[in-house]
Image (spheres, rainbow, N blue to C red):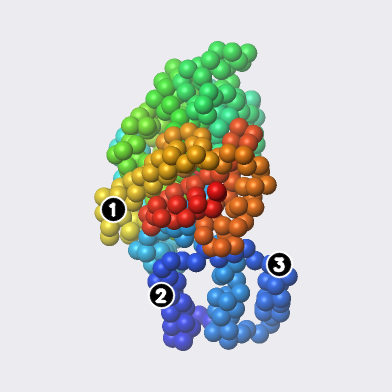
Amino acid sequence: MHTYDPNLTDLVFAYMRDRLQLDPVPLDHPGDKDKLDRALAGLIGQEGNDPAEVLRLYAEQLAPTVISCDSPRFLSFIPAAPTKAALLFDMVVSCASIQGISWLEASGAIAAENQVLRLIADLAGLPAQAGGCFVSGGSAGNLSALVVARDTARRKRGLGDFDRVRIAVSDQAHSSIGNTLRIIGVEPLVVATADHRLTGPALREALLADPDPANVIGVVATAGTTNAGIVDDLAGVAEVASEYGLWFHVDGAYGGAGLFAPSVRHKYAGIEHADSFVVDPHKWLFAPFDCAALVYRDPHLAKAVHTQDASYLDVLHTGDKYEWNPTDYAYHLTRRARGLPLWFSLAVHGVKAYTDAVETALTLARDTAEVIRATPHLELIRDPELSAVVFRRTGWTADDYTAWSDRLLAGQVGFVTPTGWEGETVARFAFLHPHTTMDMVHEILDTMK
Ligand SMILES: *Cc1c(COP(=O)(O)O)cnc(C)c1O
């Protein structure tokens, strides 16, 4: 099974060619558990199967039960729209078994990944020493960054490993932030928001009202909430963070891509003060899963926290001044060089193509908001800041939204799931795919009459 097999290779490459050419990619439908179990029954035993049969089973039974998040009609959650160049290079990363653990083993891959991290750091206005690594997603990035925030503060303040520390978060922070704090044993100081946006004054007020603000060691701001695309008052939060000596983490998993878009760049003012910053290229920077960029202002602080100490790893730390071990900047050890597909695609297409693609989704959101505003039975809930549009169909109940969403998927018109807004069920579009058209939007909105 380690010998090159031209037939197996042709089979898989032919499948990949077909998948890459699908236009449009069908949305597809959720699967039926019994049917899937029947299709898979007995497949893996002591002896293998004909690869053509296994691939057929995959293509006919399994693939159609995976909703295509790269369809331009996928407007739920956060969609995906990886470039062809990035998808293809992901195969190179796989076929060449490229890992990106240490400089000793993978310097070329790491140099290329770091070139992309540098571009992102430059767009954010972070200083020359900034750096980090690619991790599997925003959740892993937030966790890795907040561990550094916690341990750095404990060390600077002369606290023990189990002394109580807290991190300020807004009531709008992503669920992964709450998870992270539970995992790392840090309590949140939850800051209430007016209009869903964390501001410097609200953070200051919460600290002033708190009986024990001294144990608050960090703050998380969101650069693009997942539900409505709201960018926190990064400059105001940065100012208070500096005043109180707080670690300033910016979660831009979804919205960080807006740094590429001149029409919204001003909303990110203050991000240049971040101690750590996360953006998911597998969301709005058109990379395949799974890929998040994690950048620290002072990477040596992360290295002091995340470097794994094991005698068999000592050789990785050679003392070479150019050495950069991505494994030292997050809680992982072994890692795929998952930044390379983005690197390849950026190098092939140039940054301007990314700027244009991000702006396309922003324009779609603005144009959709206009249509909603002009439609009597629809109500725009707030002006879109980024590419998420939240709106209601007057008179509809939660069940109406669910039934509508099911109908849209059944008819393959769109995958548009409802969301919650201030306790109410409402409709939401998350734009991202540059091939989503206003015709598709009209087609979907017309089903809400
Ligand atoms: C998506 C998202 C996350 C989580 O990222 P994953 O890549 O899904 O782990 C965190 N924060 C925000 C704001 C997000 O939109």
* Residue drawn at 55 percent across, 79 percent down: 55
Q: Which residue is mark 2?
A: 17
220 with respect to 45 (left or right): left
State the image coordinates of residue 44 (x, y, percent, origin top left).
Answer: 67, 78
Residues at discs 1 and 3 in contact (Cβ within 8 Å)? no
State the image coordinates of residue 230 (x, y, percent, origin top left).
Answer: 46, 34
- For residue 233, what is the image quadrant? top left
Residue in the foreground of this view, choosing between 173 and 106:
173
User: What numbered label is drawn on residue 9?
Assistant: none
Q: Is 392 placed above or below 292 here?
A: above
User: What numbered label is drawn on residue 33?
Assistant: 3
Query: Quick one: label 3, few (<14), some, or many (20+) residues within 10 Å?
Result: few
Residue 317 in view of the camera: no
Q: CA distance from mark 1 to mark 2?
A: 23 Å
Residue with the most extreme right position:
34
Query: Quick one: label 1, few (<14), some, or many (20+) residues within 10 Å?
Result: some
Asked if the beta carbon under badge 3 is closer than 8 A to the nearest atom of ligand 1, the reply is no
Q: Amino acid at mark 2?
A: Arg
Residue 236 in view of the camera: yes
Q: CA distance from mark 2 to mark 3?
A: 29 Å
Q: Is 12 placed above or below 23 here?
A: below
Q: CA distance from mark 1 to mark 3?
A: 41 Å
* Residue drawn at 43 percent across, 79 percent down: 14
User: What numbered label is drawn on residue 353?
Assistant: 1
- First along the sequence among labels 2 and 3: 2
Secondary structure at badge 3 equals helix
Query: Quick one: label 2, few (<14), some, or many (20+) residues within 10 Å?
Result: few
* Residue drawn at 63 percent across, 29 percent down: 187
Q: Amino acid at mark 1?
A: Ala
* Residue drawn at 68 percent across, 67 percent down: 32
Secondary structure at badge 1 equals helix
- First along the sequence among labels 1 and 3: 3
